[in-house]
Image (spheres, helix red, strand yellow):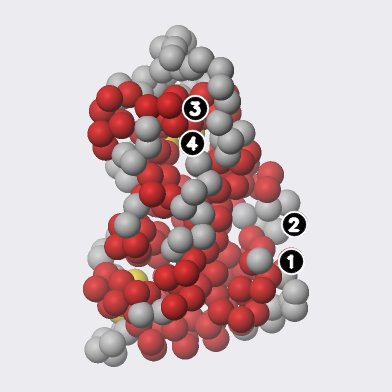
Amino acid sequence: MLSAIWETEGLQTVGIVVLVFASIKLLHILGLISFSEDSVEDELELSAVRHRPEGLEQLEAQTRFSRKELQILYRGFKNECPSGVVNEDTFKDIYAQFFPQGDASTYAHFLFNAFDTDHNGSLSFEDFVMGLSILLRGTVQEKLIWAFNLYDINKDGYITKEEMLDIMKAIYDMMGKCTYPVLKEETPRQHVEVFFQKMDKNKDGVVTIDEFIDCCQNDENIMRSMHLFENVL
């Protein structure tokens, strides 16, 4: 699927798809795509961990996951991250496992920063499920706001051409060389030039969140990609 999208829809759409696809792969590596019938009522009763997550009721109220889904998510999270938190190096190691043909470190860095909303250098279970809730169960508007924050690397409220290019190059490094046909070195820059011109309505050299959302909502391919993985959990 992804190789076809590279060829027909361009890097701008792939950037949105990969954002969600990478999160699905993270669920897969944690063994969370399908439910188990085992009792997990004690899954949030922690021992010998550095970080204790919020109560189930609070997380259930703050996300679009059910109590059982949260319990199962936590079981996989705890198995992969016994300390209760994930640092950036661990996050990169996880992504390297399912993108072994490329270099996923830069994209994992950007994605880690997007999940790490309080910017303390580590991901708690709360950070993890809050981001996943938006990516898998959020409205289109919520997903696009999350994606904008990913592209807004320095968090100044604008996306520059350089920031968009950095993300696209990271995607290219992670999986571009494994696509067919193989992308040329200049392909990310060419796609960014075209898509940035489309997004930057007032031609002031930056893309605002309103410009980003408006452009994406009027792009049929991006809108289709928003609904690809809604029912995986």
Upstream in sequence: badge 4 or badge 1: 4
Q: Which residue is mark 4?
A: 87
Q: Which residue is mark 3?
A: 72
In the rendered image, the vertical position of residue 191 relative to residue 130, given as above or below:
below
Look at discs 3 and 1 and give the one toward the viewer: 3
**Amino acid type, callout 4:** Asn
**Amino acid type, callout 2:** Gln
Label 2: element kind: loop
Q: CA distance from mark 3 to mark 2?
A: 30 Å
Report the disc number at residue 89. none
Label 1: element kind: helix
Camera sees residue 160 = no
**Farthest residue toward the top?**
47
List x then y, in percent, for residue 162. Answer: 43, 75
Residue sitting at x 48%, y 76%: 221
Q: CA distance from mark 3 to mark 1?
A: 33 Å
Upstream in sequence: badge 3 or badge 1: 3
Q: Which residue is mark 1?
A: 178
Q: CA distance from mark 4 to mark 1?
A: 28 Å
Q: CA distance from mark 1 to mark 2?
A: 7 Å
List x then y, in percent, for residue 79. Answer: 57, 24
List x then y, in percent, for residue 227. Answer: 46, 61
Whether tag 1 and tag 2 are in contact, CB under 8 A, the answer is yes
Look at discs 3 and 4 and give the one toward the viewer: 3
At label 4, counting other C-alpha atoms closer than 10 Å, the crowd grade (few under 14, some 14-19, many 20 or more) is some
In the rendered image, the vertical position of residue 47 relative to residue 217, given as above or below:
above
Look at discs 3 and 2 and give the one toward the viewer: 3
Q: Which residue is mark 2?
A: 101
Whether tag 4 and tag 1 are in contact, CB under 8 A, the answer is no
Q: CA distance from mark 3 to mark 4?
A: 21 Å
